[in-house]
Image (tube, rainbow, N blue to C red):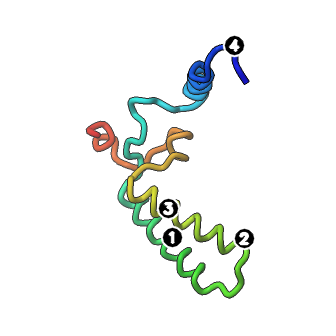
Amino acid sequence: MRIFGQSKDLEMWVIFRIFTLTTNFNLFNFMKTNMGTKDRLARVGMAILFSILYIYTPVESIWTVLLLFTGGYMIGSTAIGYCPVYDVIGYTTCNKEKNLDD
């Protein structure tokens, strides 16, 4: 689909502008740390628990796959210290001073 017969680049620019105007997205603050130490430790603990449940669940079902993906998401977001869900809702668990220094 072309917008007013223009190129694909213009379409992508329009989509990007709509996204940035309707969400909390800021290109210059993208993926700044928004997770504190306690939040990260809780996520690691939950990811370990989900991994254990996945290993010891005898039946392969959608719930076991969901446990695996949720645990992987938690480990990934903990490793980089950034949670996209927190960014969308404008929430942070890290110290304000540390977040401003990044």
> What's the CA distance linking mark 3 and mark 4?
43 Å
Task: Say which quadrant the C terminus sits in.
Answer: top left
* Vertical comparison of 49 with 26: above or below: below
Front disc: 3 or 1: 3
Q: Secondary structure at mark 4?
A: loop
**Image coordinates for residue 44, horizontal then vertical, percent:** 44, 68
Q: Are marks 3 and 1 in contact (CB under 8 Å)?
A: yes
| Residue ID at (61%, 23%) | 8
> What's the CA distance linking mark 2 and mark 3?
18 Å
Badge 4 or badge 2: first in the primary sequence: 4
Q: Are marks 3 and 4 in contact (CB under 8 Å)?
A: no
Q: Badge 4 is on which residue?
A: 5
* Vertical comparison of 30 with 64: above or below: above
Numbered badge on residue 74: 3
| Residue ID at (60%, 86%) | 56
State the residue in front, 6 or 39: 6
Residue type, label 4: Gly
Q: Residues within 10 Å of mark 4 (few under 14, many from 20)?
A: few
> What's the CA distance linking mark 3 and mark 1?
8 Å
**Image coordinates for residue 38, horizontal then vertical, percent:** 39, 61
Q: Badge 1 is on which residue?
A: 46
Q: Secondary structure at mark 1?
A: helix
Q: Residues within 10 Å of mark 3 (few under 14, many from 20)?
A: many
| Residue ID at (73%, 75%) | 61
Front disc: 4 or 1: 4
Residue type, label 1: Met
| Residue ID at (64%, 14%) | 6
Q: Badge 2 is on which residue?
A: 62
Q: Are marks 4 and 1 in contact (CB under 8 Å)?
A: no
Badge 2 or badge 1: first in the primary sequence: 1
Front disc: 2 or 3: 2
State the residue in front, 48 or 10: 10
